[in-house]
Image (cartoon, grey):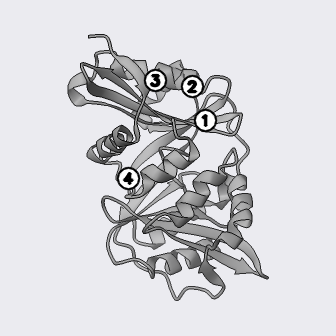
Amino acid sequence: MTATVRPLTQAEAGGALDWAAAEGWNPGHADLDCFLAQDPALFLGAFAGGEMLSVISATRYGDGFGFVGFYIARPEARGLGHGIAVWRAAMARLDGRLVGLDGVVAQQANYRKSGFVLAWNNIRFGGVPVPPGAPATGIVPATPAYLPAIEALDREVFPAPRAAFLRAWLTAPGHVALVLLRGGAVAAFGVIRPCRMGHKIAPLVAAGAGDAEALVGALLARVPPGPVFLDVPEPHRAAVALAERLGLTPGFETARMYTGPAPALARDRIFGITTFELG
């Protein structure tokens, strides 16, 4: 049966997050509104007979960057061409841009066929954390007054501006967003959010492990005890060591790939990736 590919409605996009949860990706409770704040048409789906068979996200950032995620087909619809249909639609939507993705490591060869090149691997750590010592002073809520400074820090670790997304992410229901101040200026920031299981710390951006660990302590102190997840770039040894000090253990890896040379990011400041789905 030939499928039709089209953008998803908001309700259908919520179904895509349910599919992601069923795949074990553990999305956050407020993720959908935050994602749509960045790009209202980012979700695409293949439909036949009124049924959604496969989904993908193709998020546009500015004029030159895009990110692919949520690439899922119904188990009974796999191998029938519906996945490749949404993939082609996503790449067409992002045509002319540098495109990134966090894919299953085992699928690297397939992504290479579409022009993607491996930049590095990411690791998801998880578990019930051992809280670090007493949080440092100078950690305060990330109020709107700090948004310009947060945007500036985010631009050091992300290839394009994403102000609309950040505004939504910092203020979404259940999200706790904090900044670490030094000399009155924002030196680091982090967010912890409730997910289908436990919480995720994402993002966590700091110049050094000490600031990152202080923020983690403050974030953990503001949420109920339970499982916590942290996604880190595998080559950033200080971020990996922080996850290990927290008592978290590696779950799985993703391959960060781009359709061209990897953008120049301050990867040594990335102690927690925002999402595997939107970058």
Between the C-alphas of marks 1 and 2, the distance is 9 Å
Query: Regarding mark 4 in the picture, which secondary structure is present there?
Result: loop
- Of tags 1 and 2, the one toward the viewer is 2
The amino acid type of the residue labelled 3 equals: Trp
Res. 66 mark: 1
Q: Residue at x 62, y 82 (%)?
A: 139
Q: How far apart are labels 4 and 3 at the CA level?
A: 21 Å
Pointers 2 and 3 in contact (C-beta within 8 Å): no
Residue type of the residue flagged with mark 2: Arg
Q: Say whether marks 1 and 2 touch (CB < 8 Å).
A: yes
Where disc 3 sits, the SS reads helix
Q: Tell me if mark 4 has few (under 14), some (14-19) or many (20+) residues whose alpha carbon lies within 10 angstroms of its own.
A: many
**Residue at far right of view:** 183
Q: Which residue is found at the position 63% from the left and 88% from the top?
A: 137
2 or 3: mark nearer the eye = 2
Q: Earlier in the sequence, mark 4 or mark 1?
A: 4
Q: 65 above or below 126?
A: above
Residue where numbered disc 3 is placed = 87
Residue 110 or 77: which is nearer the viewer? 77
Q: Secondary structure at mark 2?
A: helix
> First in sequence: mark 1 or mark 3?
1
Identify the residue at image location x=50%, y=53%.
34
Q: Earlier in the sequence, mark 1 or mark 2?
A: 1
- Residue holding disc 2: 93
Residue 92 image point, x, y percent: 56, 20
Quick one: label 2 or label 3, which is nearer the N terminus?
A: 3
